[in-house]
Amino acid sequence: MQSAKALLEKQHLQELELRWRDDDDEKFRVVRQWSPQLQLVSRKAEPENNYCLEDEMILQGLQPHHSVKKLVIAGFCGERLPDWIGNLSSLSSLEIRNCSGLRFDIAT
């Protein structure tokens, strides 16, 4: 398994898609479209709360270089997006799909 920290070193990476998908209802995988041959995570299904919390920790560890221009997050079941999203200074497109567990706190 390659270290997720390697994403920080990818200075020329401009687009990144992080996808969670269900394989046979037993395994879940994070798939990187730019490098599909590198499997970051493979784990047995666990109770929903456990794997959603684990997904949050995994996504927090997948911080790309700040030069990323387009980021897609799909199928993520956690409640919170990672802190590093606010530090992507070149980000021009953020797409969030099928992330039904996300909670948004709206300041009044």
Image (cartoon, rainbow, N blue to C red):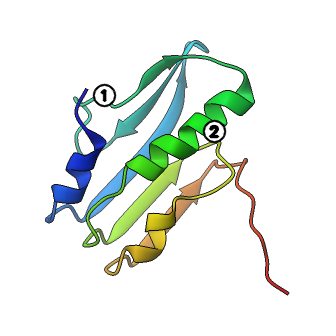
Judged from this view, the residue extending furthest toward the bottom is 108
N-terminal of the two: label 1 or label 2? 1
Given residues 51 and 20, the one toward you in this image is 51
* Local crowd size for mark 1, using a 10 Å CA cut-off: few (<14), some (14–19), many (≥20): few
Residue 97 versus residue 39 in the image, above or below: below
Where in the figure is residue 40, as x and y percent of width and height?
34, 31
Relative placement, left or right, of 12 versus 53 is left
SS assignment at label 1: loop
- Amino acid type, callout 2: Leu
User: Looking at the image, which residue is at 69% across and 51% down?
Assistant: 79
Q: Which mark is residue 53?
A: 2
* Local crowd size for mark 2, using a 10 Å CA cut-off: few (<14), some (14–19), many (≥20): some
Where in the figure is residue 95, as x and y percent of width and height?
51, 63
Q: Which quarter of the figure is the N terminus placed in?
A: top left
Q: Which mark is residue 24?
A: none
Given residues 23 and 68, the one toward you in this image is 68
Residue 75 visible (yes or no): no
Residue 100 versus residue 27 in the image, above or below: below
Where in the figure is residue 63, as x and y percent of width and height?
36, 56
Q: How many circles with numbers are drawn on the protein?
A: 2
Residue 40 versus residue 66 in the image, above or below: above
- Amino acid type, callout 1: Gln
Q: Which mark is residue 39?
A: 1
